Image (spheres, helix red, strand yellow):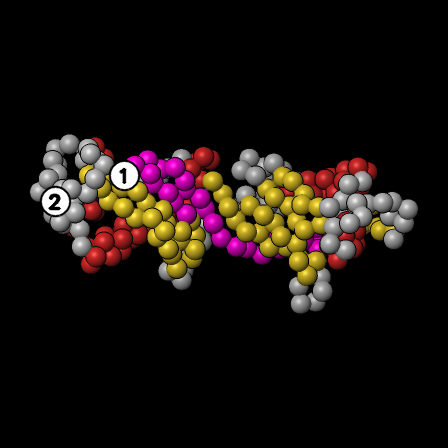
């Protein structure tokens, strides 16, 4: 078990079930998903994947998204990698959405008489929303949570008679159109997103998607090394 480059080594480890991929955090931190416990080998792997993550030259990072980078074998039995993107946009870049615009969509559609249009809507209408928009191109999304309430007493007393099933369906449609437009204007590189609003406060905005990593084999083969695993206990026996 002698290896002369990083590709040969990682292909062997993957086929043995000893390495699965790596998790990349919001600010560039990464962790290799592996069953290996040999410190010498772990150090080598961290150097390899650190070089890959940041690239050989400044500004040429190979990993540009946060999420899990999953190793797999392609149809030619070559080591490949896909990334399941999961970037915390809210933490990293802030909130591009306007709660007043969202509540305005609701108020306008329902023609609410109880609303004072000279005051902020966020103090009159309370929205709880959770949307998972898997694919903007395919129009695939789910609304696990969508609740409109009167803000003052946290009930639907004034809104209840106005909100019918057909109204909710139309409001969702109008709100989604606004969310998608705003997302595309600000973060169109993400093919999907998830968003959570709790009592009018944005608590989650995550960019999502899936992407195939290019040039992995070429990069790993360029990382030369000399390592012999013949007498190394690289993982705990189970």
- Examine the rendering and report whether any part of residue 163 can be seen: yes
Name the element at disc 1. helix
Q: Which residues are magenta?
A: 194-221
Q: Is-magenta flag for residue 167?
A: no
Q: Position of residue 189 (x, y in %)?
A: 46, 49
At 38% from the left edge and 45% from the top edge, which residue is drawn?
195
Q: Position of residue 21 (x, y in %)?
A: 66, 49
- Please indicate whether residue 20 sits to the left or right of residue 177 in the image: right
Badge 1 crowding class, 10 Å Cα cut-off, few under 14, some 14 to 19, many 20 or more, is some
Numbered label attached to residue 112: 2
Neighbours of disc 2 within 10 Å: few (<14), some (14-19), many (20+): some
Residue at point 77% right, 38% down?
43
Q: Residue 105: give x, y in percent of width and height.
A: 21, 47
Instruction: Kindly give the residue lying farthest to the bottom in the view shown.
Output: 75
The secondary structure that most of the magenta stretch takes on is: strand
Label disc, if present, on residue 99 of the rendered structure: 1
Q: Is residue 214 magenta?
A: yes
Is residue 112 shown left or right of residue 100?
A: left
The residue located at (60%, 55%) in the rendering is: 82
Q: Quadrant of residue 217?
A: bottom right
Residue closest to the eye, 190 or 110: 110
User: Is tag 1's residue or tag 2's residue first in the polypeptide sequence?
Assistant: 1
Q: Are the two marked residues, 1 and 2, in contact with CB atoms closer than 8 angstroms?
A: no
Q: Which mark is residue 33?
A: none
Query: Is 17 rendered above or below residue 103?
Result: below
Q: Nearer the viewer, mark 1 or mark 2?
A: 2
Between marks 1 and 2, how big is the CA–CA gap?
A: 17 Å
Asked which quadrant contains residue 153, the reply is: top left
Residue 160 image position (x, y, % from top left)? 16, 47
Residue furthest to the right: 231
């Amino acid at each position: 078990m002698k290896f002369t480059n990083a590709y040969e080594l990682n292909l062997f480890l993957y086929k043995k079930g000893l390495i699965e991929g790596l998790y990349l955090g919001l600010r560039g931190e990464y962790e290799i998903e592996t069953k290996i416990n040999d410190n010498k080998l772990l150090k080598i792997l961290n150097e390899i994947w650190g070089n890959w993550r940041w690239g050989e030259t400044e500004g040429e990072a190979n990993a540009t998204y946060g999420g899990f980078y999953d190793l797999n074998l392609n149809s030619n039995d070559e080591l490949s990698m896909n990334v399941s993107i999961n970037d915390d946009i809210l933490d990293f870049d802030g909130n591009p959405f306007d709660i007043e615009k969202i509540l305005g969509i609701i108020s306008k559609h329902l023609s609410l008489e109880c609303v004072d249009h000279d005051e902020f809507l966020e103090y009159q209408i309370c929205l709880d929303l959770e949307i998972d928009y898997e694919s903007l191109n395919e129009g695939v999304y789910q609304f696990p949570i969508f609740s409109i309430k009167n803000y003052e007493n946290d009930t639907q007393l004034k809104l209840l008679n106005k909100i019918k099933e057909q109204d909710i369906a139309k409001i969702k449609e109008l709100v989604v159109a606004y969310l998608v437009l705003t997302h595309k204007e600000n973060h169109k590189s993400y093919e999907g997103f998830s968003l959570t609003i709790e009592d009018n406060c944005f608590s989650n905005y995550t960019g999502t998607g899936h992407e195939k990593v290019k040039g992995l084999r070429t990069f790993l083969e360029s990382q030369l090394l000399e390592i012999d695993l013949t007498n190394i206990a690289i993982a705990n026996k189970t």
